Amino acid sequence: MKVIVVGTGIAGASAAYQLEKAGVDVTMIDRVQEGKATSAGAGIVCPWISSVENPDWYRIAKRGAAFYPSLIESLQADGETETGYKKVGALSVSTSMDILDSIEQRVREKQKTAPELGDIRRLNKTETQNYFPMLADELEAVYVSGAARVDGRFLREALKNAAQKHGAQLIQGTAGLKVEKGQVTGVVVEGAFFEADAVLLTAGAWAPELLKDLGLELHIEPQRGQIAHIKLSNQDTSSWPVVLPQTSYYMLAFDDSRVVAGATRETGSGFDHRLTAGGVHEILQECLEIAPGLQEGTLQEIRIGFRPMGPDILPLIGSINKVKGLYIANGLGASGLTMGPYVGALVSKLIMGESLSIDLRPYDPMRAIITKPERVN
Ligand code: FAD
C-alpha cells in the first residue's frame, strides 16, 4: 500500500512514522512555510488541570498525554534520542486558596482514571518558588508530577528521521491533490505526479486551500499565536516545571536556560505573519506579572505560529467520504502538541483498516466540510 502524507507537522510526522513502521510505503511532502504551528508551539503536555468540560476533548487529550512515553521509547529504539520531551511536572498557581482547593479537587478526581498524571501536592509560597524561582513570591500552587513539556521542532524531526530510517521518502514542495472519478489517485508537487492508494491531509491551517480545488469548503481557520523566548544567564532551567496561572497564559522552560512565555490567541488573524506591538505587550505584561524574576532575562526571540482551529474544540480525524482514499487529521487547535502524536497514530490505523480502541464519531471531519456537489468528480 502506498500512502502520501501532505504536511509534516506533529500530526503528519507521527502518522508517517507509524505507517512506515507498519510496512506501508510512505511519501511525506512538506514545504518551506512561515508560521508552522508545530515550530511555534509552547509544548505543554498537561490535559488534567484544564477546565475544559468537553468529555470528547478530554478523552483524546488524556490519551494523547498517556501515549508519549511509549512513543519516546519507540523513537529511542530507532536511534532518535533528541525528542525534546521531558516530564517536568506542572504548577497550577494562584494567590487564592479557594481556587487552588477547587483545582486540587478536580485533579484528584481525574487521577482516579488517569494515574499517569502522577503525584498531586499542595505547595506553599517558598516551595512554589523553589520549583520555579522567577515566580512572584505571593503565589502558591498545586503541583502535578506527570506533566511534561516537548519541543515540537525536535519531536517532529525525530519522527521524520525515524520514518525515513524505516524507508519513507521526503519531498519538499507544495502538494496539490489529484482526484479522478471520486477517488484520490495521488498528488502533484511542482508539476510532478506522485501516485498513491491513499492521501492523508495533515496540512494544518493551510488544508482548506487543498480542498478548495475539489469544491470542498473546509472550516479550518488560522489563529495566530505570538510566544516569547527569554534567555536567562547562570540558571539551570532544565527541570523547571510548567507554570499555569488562572488565565490563558503560561510559562515553561527548556534545557538551554530558556523560558518560553505565551501566548496570544488571535482569532481572525488570517495568515498575517507579523509580531504586533499589542501582542508582544500582552504576553510580556501577563507573564512578567506572574514571574517578575524574568525582567532581567534577554528577550531572545518571539515566535509566530498559526493554530489550525476547527468549528469546535474537537480535532478532525477520519476519511473525507466525498473522495475515496482521502483522509484528514486537523483542527488540533491549542492542544496539538498534546494530542498530535496520538491523533497521527489513530489516523494511520484507520488508513490501514485496523480496529481502533476509541470511537471516532465525535471527531468526524465531515462536520467541518461543506460540499459544492458539482465540483467533486
Ligand atoms: P502544522 O504544524 O502547522 O503543520 C502543517 C504542515 O503542513 C506545515 O509543515 C506546512 O508547511 C505543511 N503544508 C501545508 N500546506 C501544504 C502543501 N500544500 N504542501 C505541502 N505542505 C503543506 N499545543 C499543545 O498541546 N501544547 C502547547 O503548549 C501548545 N502551545 C502552542 C503555542 C502556540 C503559540 C501555538 C501557535 C500553538 C500551540 N499549540 C500547543 C498547538 C500546536 O502547536 C498545534 O495544534 C499543532 O502543532 C498543529 O500541528 P499540525 O501538524 O496540525 O500543523
Image: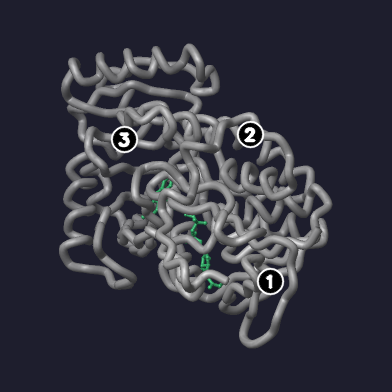
Whether tag 1 and tag 2 are in contact, CB under 8 A, the answer is: no
* Picture residue at 75% right of the left edge, 68% below the top: 169
Whether tag 3 and tag 1 are in contact, CB under 8 A, the answer is: no
Mark 3–mark 1 distance (CA, rounded to whole Å): 44 Å
Mark 2–mark 3 distance (CA, rounded to whole Å): 22 Å
The kind of residue tagged 3 is Leu
Residue 282, which numbered label? none
Q: Looking at the image, is mark 1 or mark 2 nearer the viewer?
A: 1
Q: Earlier in the sequence, mark 2 or mark 3?
A: 2
Is label 1 within 8 A of ligand 1 (CB to nearest ligand atom)? no
Mark 1–mark 2 distance (CA, rounded to whole Å): 34 Å
Q: Earlier in the sequence, mark 1 or mark 2?
A: 2
Which image quadrant is residue 370 in?
Answer: bottom left
> Could you tell me residue 93's position as x and y percent?
27, 28
Q: Which residue is mark 1?
A: 186
Q: How many marks?
A: 3
Taking 244 as reference, is 371 left or right?
right
* Picture residue at 27% right of the left edge, 53% below the top: 265
The kind of residue tagged 1 is Gly
Of the 4 image quadrants, the one containing the N terminus is bottom right
Q: Looking at the image, is mark 3 or mark 1 nearer the viewer?
A: 1
Of the 4 image quadrants, the one containing the C terminus is bottom right
Q: Secondary structure at mark 2?
A: helix
Q: Which residue is mark 3?
A: 244
Q: Which residue is mark 2?
A: 69
